[in-house]
Image: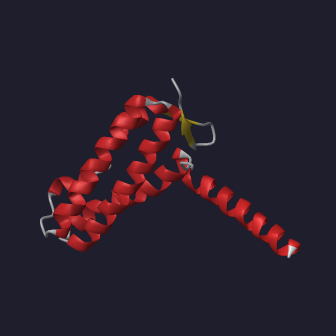
């Protein structure tokens, strides 16, 4: 009986640890590595009238921008948090419009505002990779 209690206790602690780890925002680099290819591929889908593809990609971007917003909130980078929130809202609208069969040409520009944040909060490393620049 005692062994069962110990095993249950260990499982409880492990489950609690996994829950806490799962709630921590991912690093911004990991998020942005997903955003880039999706945002770049939207233009072709919009041009081709692929409503389902646009809706799926825009919904994925909405989630990624929300993740970015959570990251920036945690890091207390208010301007980037606001830009990510706006991008998430724009992506949500694009997904909704695409599901309704109305692909707005603006949907292909969902990643266009990224430059605004990159100019302020991204710096290039000597090896060609990028890192978050804190003011």
Please name the residue shown 26% across and 66% down the image: 54
Q: Is residue 112 visible?
A: no
Using the rendered view, name the quadrant where residue 41 is placed.
Answer: bottom left
Measuring 49% from the left and 52% from the top, which residue is drawn there?
31
- How many numbered discs sit on the rendered protein? 0
Colour scheme of the rendered structure: secondary structure
Q: Is residue 121 visible?
A: yes
Please indicate whether residue 2 sits to the left or right of residue 46 in the image. Answer: right
Q: Nearer the viewer, residue 74 or 131?
A: 74
Q: Position of residue 39 (x, y in %)?
A: 34, 56
Q: Residue 94's spot in the image, x, y percent? A: 22, 58
- Residue extending furthest toward the top: 135
For the point 55% across and 50% down, which residue is it?
26
Percent coordinates x, y for residue 100 in the rendering: 14, 68
The location of residue 90, given as percent across then percent down, is 24, 49
Res 10 quadrant in image: bottom right
Can you name the residue that lies furthest to the right here?
2
Residue at image position (25%, 73%) is 52
Nearer to me, 61 or 122:
61
- Image quarter in which the N terminus is found: bottom right
Which of the 4 quarters of the picture holds residue 99? bottom left
State left or right for residue 71 relative to residue 21: left
Which residue is at the far left?
102
Q: Is residue 8 above or below residue 23?
A: below
**Left or right side of 36 for 43:** left
């Amino acid at each position: 009986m005692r062994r069962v209690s110990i095993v249950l206790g260990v499982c409880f602690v492990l489950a609690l640890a996994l829950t806490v780890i799962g709630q921590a925002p991912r690093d911004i680099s990991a998020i942005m590595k997903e955003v880039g290819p999706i945002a770049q591929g939207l233009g072709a889908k919009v041009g081709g009238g692929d409503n389902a593809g646009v809706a799926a990609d825009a919904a994925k971007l909405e989630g990624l921008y929300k993740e970015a917003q959570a990251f920036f909130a945690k890091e207390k980078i208010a301007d980037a948090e606001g830009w990510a929130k706006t991008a998430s809202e724009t992506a949500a609208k694009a997904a909704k419009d695409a599901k309704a069969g109305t692909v707005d040409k603006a949907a292909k520009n969902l990643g266009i505002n990224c430059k605004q944040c990159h100019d302020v909060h991204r710096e290039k490393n000597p090896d060609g990779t990028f890192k978050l620049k804190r003011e």
